[in-house]
Image: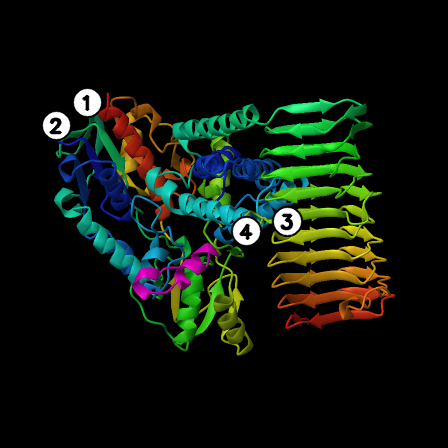
Amino acid sequence: MSRACAIVGGGLAGFVAYATLRKGGLEPADVAVFGTDPDPAAAWRVRAAAIRQRHMRSESDGHCAPTSFPGLAVRAALRRRSVVPLAESVCDRFHPTVEEFLEHVEELRTKARWDESFSRARIGRVRAAEGGFELDDQGTFPHVLLAPGHPGLAFPEELADDSRVVHAYEPHDYAEEVEVVGAGMTAATEWLNALAAGASVVSVRRREPERRPLNLPRELFTRRGLAAYHRTSPAERAAFLRRYSTPSYPPGRHWDEPLERARREGRFRLASGVNGARQIICATGFKRGLRDDPLLRRLVAEHGLETADEWIVLTPDSTVPALTDTMRTLALAGAPAQWAYPAADTLVGAKYAARRFLQKVQVWRTR
Amino acid sequence: MAYTLRGRLESRLAVVLAPLLAACVVALALKAWWPVELAGLMLGVGLAFDLTLYHRLLPYQPGWAALPLGLLELAAVMGLGRLLHVGAPLAAGLVFYAGAWLLAQVLGHAVFPMVRLSYGEDGGELGRAGAGVAAAAVVVLAAAGGIAWETQPPVVRLAAGVHQGPLVLDHSQRLVGEPGAIVRGGILVTADDVTVQDVTVVGGENGIGVEHAERVLLERVHVVDAVLDGINVRRSQVTIRDCSVGSLESPYGQGIDISFSADLAPSVVEGCLLTGGQEGIFADSVHAMLKENRVRDTTLRGITVTEMAMASVTDNDVQDALGIGIYCGDYSMCDIHDNSIAGVRPDPESSDSMRQGYAIVSHYWAHVDAEGNEVADSPRSLGVFADARATSE
């Protein structure tokens, strides 16, 4: 056994975990990362480009570095030689540009020596074994963090075979009339994109979006809100997660004014179902849950893990209780870790899982 | 940051540790306890607000809130400091508070998140270090408080009744009179850090004399029948608060005379009633703040500031002075603001043109800045003589 840790998944959640382990004193030789693309932002970059995203929804601390400070606002302030990003940040109004975020990822990738640990491999099976976990034929690792990412793009069933459909996260242009299905951040971005391209937009929605700065209330990002969350019963927690999966996008004039203007011009309206437009853009996010993730589904089946609804039941430190003890750790990060941290599918959430994973590894190393 | 209650308290105690230690060092250097008292007040106010207000009202606290909350706490600290008579100079107190606040921001936003990776998501909690830091802060405060308590001057209680003087206070102490305590024959203070409270002095060459002493507090002292001055201060720094002087025996006596202390910290005379004598307050070659005093029936001037003195004379009530109400002379600089001066009478026995019933006089290269004074029943309001200056809005 040559490496203490393995990270399954080479996306941003895995990258955050890797940077955190490096901050905790692990060398690249101590960590194996398995993924399909050495660029940790590869998948994210394509999606951001597809929806023409220019700014992050996250704020200064929405980055991949292991410590919250210095955040991207400090970086922007130094780069722009301006205190404006800092002033915006203390008012929770700083949103880094996509370009700034991607540059940061690239710099951190080099600094953390990510490529030295990265192996191109799609892990299909994680099996508990003596001294840790076997990852296909890659070896056995005492501590494994699974950050498999999203299992695929989600489409409404009734539109699955419709030739007019394109997912928002797939490259696309805009027809003269566009129906955008969904009402979250991606949908809102697509409304503005299509309007800016001269299209008429029909917003197809089943639920009214909530308006909040982040995808969850801020208390739920810290122990203040988490303490109550962690006290919930499995049924309550599953209900809670479903409730907070309602679509939302931030409040602000730069969202409302173009929509109101287009509404007055007759170029933006709401509908409860699709109805004949030449193009249907599904801003319906990702598939979620065990059913669509073969790696996790197999893990649960082979080890008889406790589940609730579509989630693996985790301890508050984001580890799988039945497979974690003082000698080994199996942790989850990203969307599958929402059972431990409801905002697990954010960069801050990735850090939450990564920091607790590091604590486990550090305790093990000092035994 | 969405703080937990424990996170708030631990963060509060952690950020106050360095200012607390600094306050102890400054206190030792200055031989004054106000830095520790101020730091203790800051901590107390902060913890009280954390427990009673912030935790309930601020489930999430944005970064910008640090500024208004800091100002709110500053107001509370300064208000309590005044109420509890913490002797912190205003400017020094503000600088200390601002430094502590700034350090708290740097620690809370930068240092703690770097040292403890999960600081933010833990709601400001510091883990095992939090308990240690909290304990350290409490220990430092308790130790400083203990030392302060231990090194406080001894308290001497003066029982009700007449005590034959003169009393000579030649070492640091607090002389506190029980109701009805009277000293006959005067009190002489010759040591630093002496407090005299709630004592009536009858007679004596000077009712209370202070010589070569600093940080002397005379509070609620009452002087009658002194031969010369009611309170006579030489080469000393004093705070005289809520006193009264009357029935001086000598026509040349003065209510309060503070002289020859220009190289010392400012002396303060506040809230005193001074009746009779040549001058109610005489400040000669000193730095002084004379405020909210009542001066009655003086035969030379109501209040005098002279001989290169620097003084603020504010909110005093001067009535029935003969010749001059408030006088600033001989290269002195006087801020004379918001005083009430009434019934100044011309001195019929003097040929001096200054003594023709001026409420305020600036004389011989002195500079008076006069604002907001009310003059009534006096023939003249402001007189400027012998190359002196006077400005007003």
Judge left or right: residue A281 versus residue B191.
Answer: left
Mark 1 in CB contact with mark 2 (< 8 angstroms):
yes
Quickly name the residue at label 2. Answer: A1
Judge left or right: residue B332 versus residue A344.
Answer: right
Mark 4 in CB contact with mark 1 (< 8 angstroms):
no
Labels in figure, total: 4
Estimate the spatial distance between the alpha carbons at disc 1 and disc 2, rounded to whole Å.
Answer: 9 Å
Sequence-wise, which precedes: disc 1 or disc 2?
2
**Residue appearing at x 33%, y 53% in the figure:** A153
Residue A51 position, x and y percent, is 35, 64
- Mark 4 vs mark 2, foreground winner is 4
Estimate the spatial distance between the alpha carbons at disc 3 and disc 2, rounded to whole Å.
Answer: 87 Å
Specify the label residue B91 is tagged with.
4
Mark 3 in CB contact with mark 2 (< 8 angstroms):
no
Residue B281 position, x and y percent, is 73, 51
Residue span colored magenta:
A77-96
| Label 4 crowd (10 A; few <14 / some 14-19 / many >=20) | few
Give the quarter of the figure containing the C terminus of chain A.
top left
Kind of element beneath mark 4:
helix
- Mark 4 vs mark 1, foreground winner is 4
Residue B291 in sight in this render: no
Q: Quadrant of residue B321?
A: bottom right
Kind of element beneath mark 3:
strand
Q: Is residue B80 above or below residue A320?
A: below
Quickly name the residue at label 1. Answer: A131
Q: Nearer the viewer, residue B315 or B226?
A: B226
Residue A341 position, x and y percent, is 41, 39
Estimate the spatial distance between the alpha carbons at disc 4 and disc 1, rounded to whole Å.
Answer: 65 Å
Q: Chain of mark 4?
A: B
